[in-house]
Amino acid sequence: MDIDNVGEILDNINSKLTLILEKLEKMDSKLQNHEKRITRLEITVFEKSKFPWKEYLILIIFAIVMSLLCNFVVEVIV
């Protein structure tokens, strides 16, 4: 085993590790993009699945007002 040979072997290992590192960095970048997309989708799903409190509150108030109005009209007629 020659010293020059060891240096060449280490250079080959270093170049292969550099390639692997570059691929891992690309994969990490892709994963971060996917995580961002998933987060946006989760937020969108959460916003769309919110219970429509405002609409139901308006309907309940409308029903109460109509009920009071009907009672008033019935008392005026009778």
Image (cartoon, rainbow, N blue to C red):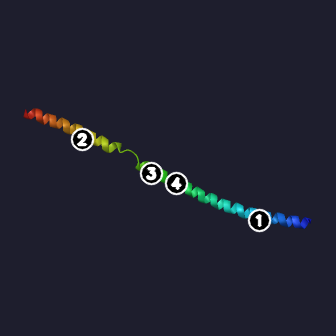
Query: What is the C-alpha distance between the residues marked 3 and 2?
Result: 30 Å
State yes or no: discs 1 and 4 in contact (Cβ < 8 Å). Answer: no
Closer to the observer: label 3 or label 2? 3
Q: Residue placed at 31% from the left, 40% from the top?
A: 57
Q: Earlier in the sequence, mark 2 or mark 1?
A: 1
For residue 17, what is the image quadrant? bottom right
Query: What is the C-alpha distance between the residues marked 2 and 4?
Result: 40 Å
Three-letter residue code for mark 3: Val
Closer to the observer: label 2 or label 4? 4
Q: Earlier in the sequence, mark 1 or mark 3?
A: 1
* Secondary structure of residue under mark 3: helix
* Secondary structure of residue under mark 2: helix
Q: Residue placed at 26% from the left, 39% from the top?
A: 61
The dot on residue 15 is 1
- List the residue tagged with mark 3: 45
Q: Earlier in the sequence, mark 3 or mark 4?
A: 4
Three-letter residue code for mark 2: Phe
Q: Earlier in the sequence, mark 3 or mark 2?
A: 3
* Secondary structure of residue under mark 1: helix
Q: Residue placed at 43% from the left, 49% from the top?
A: 47
Q: Is residue 55 above or below residue 73?
A: below
Residue 19 appears left or right of 67: right
Query: What is the C-alpha distance between the residues marked 1 and 4?
Result: 35 Å
| Placement of the N terminus among the 4 image quadrants | bottom right
Three-letter residue code for mark 4: Ile
- List the residue tagged with mark 4: 38
